[in-house]
Image: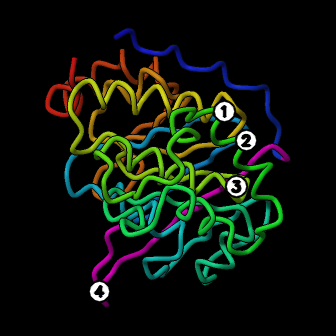
Amino acid sequence: MSTPAPATAPTTTGSDIVVDVQDLTAGYLPGINIINGANLVARKGELIGIIGPNGAGKSTLLKAIFGMVKIRGGDITVNGESIVGLNADKLVQRGVAFVPQTNNVFPSLSIEENLQMGLYQNPKIYAERLEFVTGIFAELGKRLKQRAGSLSGGERQMVAMSRALMMEPSVLLLDEPSAGLSPVRQDDAFLRVSDINKAGVTTIMVEQNARRCLQICDRGYVLDQGRDAHTGSGRDLLNDPHVIGLYLGTLGND
């Protein structure tokens, strides 16, 4: 299957910044930092990819943005306002949506009930948002009564992303959307992420499949030991000899 071409990043100004991570320090245990001065900017309509070796802090960075990891220094702003210290419900209200790698659906509920859970703060817009998400994931609209626990891994991922999109987020955080999927399902996952972004949703994606991630993203960050070691357009990072030698040789899949 052919790889979707990355969208052309829009011309932006400071007012177009959706997420701004500044000199972030964070960790799970007292005195042990996983994120060590990381920086990241996502502008309106961009697809941002985060790659790096195992243990680099990629997923921890996403969890820190979503308030799941203790912030010890620096700041995170969404649409110009700090979100540090906010609980998940407040983050959703601020337009932040997060799709974890695992345990990302309610298996005992139907697809429709999962989508309704995504709108528990504003159920009145269900019909409008259902039309949006089924425009991207058309097959879900035909199977709304099916129990989520009966779905394949790739199908569950679609439900999880759809539920996250129900509240019309300013930014969608995706933690390794292709993890554990077959090669065909991986291709499909990357196509869907690209479709979500082309629909106007600013997206930040952590991925172990570094090459495929960089092929579709507008800009990429290479995280190493909790810091942004390299940044640039996806195309530039794919062709950077240093990035190829240190990261893509072991992380990238042709």
Disc 1/disc 4 C-alpha distance (Å): 42 Å
Neighbor class of circle 4 (other Cα within 10 Å; few <14, some 14-19, many 20+) is few
**Residue 244 is a magenta residue:** no
Disc 3/disc 2 C-alpha distance (Å): 15 Å
Disc 3/disc 1 C-alpha distance (Å): 16 Å
* Residue range (magenta): 15-34
Q: Label 3, on which residue?
A: 169
Point out which mark residue 135 bears.
Answer: 1
- Identify the element where label 2 is drawn: helix
Neighbor class of circle 3 (other Cα within 10 Å; few <14, some 14-19, many 20+) is many
**Could you tell me the amino acid type at mark 4?**
Leu
Point out which mark residue 230 bears.
Answer: none
Q: Give the image location of residue 67, x and y in percent.
A: 52, 76
> Residue drawn at (29%, 46%), measured in percent from left and top?
153
Residues at marks 3 and 2 touching, judged by CB atoms closer than 8 Å: no
Q: Earlier in the sequence, mark 4 or mark 2?
A: 4
Q: Give the image location of residue 70, x and y in percent.
A: 45, 82
> Residue drawn at (27%, 55%), measured in percent from left and top?
56
Q: Earlier in the sequence, mark 3 or mark 4?
A: 4
> Residue drawn at (75%, 58%), measured in percent from left and top?
126
Residues at marks 1 and 2 touching, judged by CB atoms closer than 8 Å: yes
Q: Label 4, on which residue?
A: 29
Disc 3/disc 4 C-alpha distance (Å): 30 Å
Question: Residue reaching furthest bottom?
Answer: 30
Q: Nearer the viewer, residue 150 or 154?
A: 150
Protein image colouring: rainbow
Q: Earlier in the sequence, mark 3 or mark 2?
A: 2
Q: Label 2, on which residue?
A: 131
